[in-house]
Image (cartoon, grey):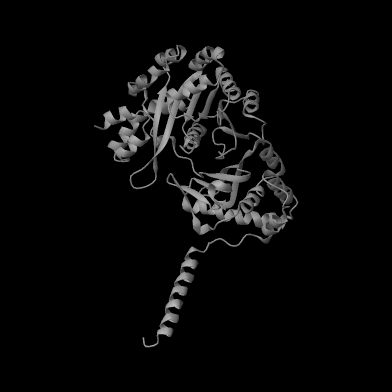
Amino acid sequence: MNNPALADILAQQVKLGAAVSKARVRAPIVPQLPAIVKTIVDSIPDSMYDEDRVRYMADQVNSLLEKDRVALRDHMQIFVKRCVDLGASDMDCGAMGCDGYFWYRVDGDKRRYEELGQYTYEETDLLFLNLLNERQMKVLFEEKSVDFSYQLPIEGKDGKRRRFRTTCYFDNDHLGLNMRQITDEVFPLKSLGFHPLIEKGMMFRHVRDGLTLVTGVTGSGKSTTLDAIIDANNEDVPAHCVIIAKPIEFMHDSKRCIVRHREVGKDVISFKAGIVQALRQDPDIIVIGEMRDPETISAALEITDSGHKVFSTLHTISAVETIDRIVAEYPTEEQERIRIRLADVLRCIVSQKLCPKIGGGRILAKDVLWMDSSSRAAIKNGNTGEIYQMMWEGSRAGMTTLEQDLLRLTKQRLITPETAMDFANNKRRMQQLLR
């Protein structure tokens, strides 16, 4: 080109065009926040700091016109629907931890989705406060965290609305939020890979009492397993099942069973109260969402001891750790009594993990203890360290250690040997198995 000045101008235009194109690619795909958000944020007095700013916004939200609250809910639904579209198990957002972005966990990995835009702490505070009613706000400020269920106004695969287990909590004087997607379908119990004897033991028709615990870390599929057990009994036998949870997740239709759903904080004031009240409701099966404190554990043992079939969960990674954790919840002088009581009522412990599957997705691996006379004696005598070997040798009774189950999945080419090592509790034993 003969004109250098013109060449420079054209080069600048190309750069500008590329920058505009790049900006378009990165532009958020979410509409602007409703104008009421800026109005409220700008109205926060400069003299307010920390939690007082959140309390001020809560008061403003409670005073909003219905049309403004609907606009805020509609905006929040954009992010929740993205969770459904991605097939994500969880969505996290808000406060310092998320740096203004929305994060989603897909196939076990959690990452930020920058295309949804970046928000200030006050903007997400308002969106989250708008999800709460006044009672839930009160709990949030008193306990610094509140659990509740949330549902989208769209239908799931079975004609039901998509539901989420939600926690809103304080994080460095602002609000963080986690939403866990509740599946709108129940897996058949047989699809979870339990030994037929263990399946039989979970059914009220065959074993009408005792405590079964499903354990694992957050996101390990405990609720999915419990729902499969509930549904199998619901289809099998005429009985009465009472579910006590915080919050209620999957909603079971009554089939052959009456299925009651009692949400702690909404239908009943506490897990213990729900368990005690259940005794007067003529139940056959009682499902306790989580045994999270000695009070709930004691109530669960008591109702099991009265001849009911009870299912519950704990955040532990193995059958042996589960027993030790329950006993350790009590003062030293009470632990022997609790060991004896637990040994008498316990039927089964399933400790599970979700492992990355070859080809994508995740698959269940589990530790399974079925109580027999030897394991009962081990618990009563405080020799829980012996139980692992009992499980190792108990395949005829349907038992398995996590390492044996990981080896099975590896041989079936469902997971890699590296995954088996990563998820094993006993690394040395797993290494020996993989040789």
Residue 303, x across and y down, in percent: 58, 21
Q: Is residue 350 visible?
A: yes
Query: In this orientation, which residue lies closer to the viewer: 61 or 107?
Result: 61
Q: Name the quarter where the N terminus is drawn.
A: bottom left
Q: Name the quarter where the C terminus is drawn.
A: top left
Residue 315, x across and y down, in percent: 50, 31
In this rendering, would 124 be left or right of 21?
right
Total marks drawn? Answer: 0
Residue 277, x across and y down, in percent: 65, 25
In this rendering, would 390 be left or right of 60?
left
Residue pictured at 50% horizontal, 59% vertical:
115
Residue pictured at 60% horizontal, 22% vertical:
299
Q: Residue furthest bottom?
A: 2
Q: Residue furthest left?
A: 435
Q: Is residue 256 above or below residue 395?
A: below
In this rendering, would 175 be left or right of 322?
right
Query: In this orientation, which residue lies closer to the viewer: 312 or 389?
Result: 389
Q: Residue furthest front?
A: 4
Residue pictured at 37% horizontal, 88% vertical:
2
Query: In this orientation, which residue lies closer to the viewer: 429 or 305?
Result: 429
Q: Is residue 162 visible?
A: no
Residue 44, x across and y down, in percent: 72, 53
Q: Is residue 96 above or below residue 36?
A: above
The answer to which image quadrant residue 401 occupies is top left
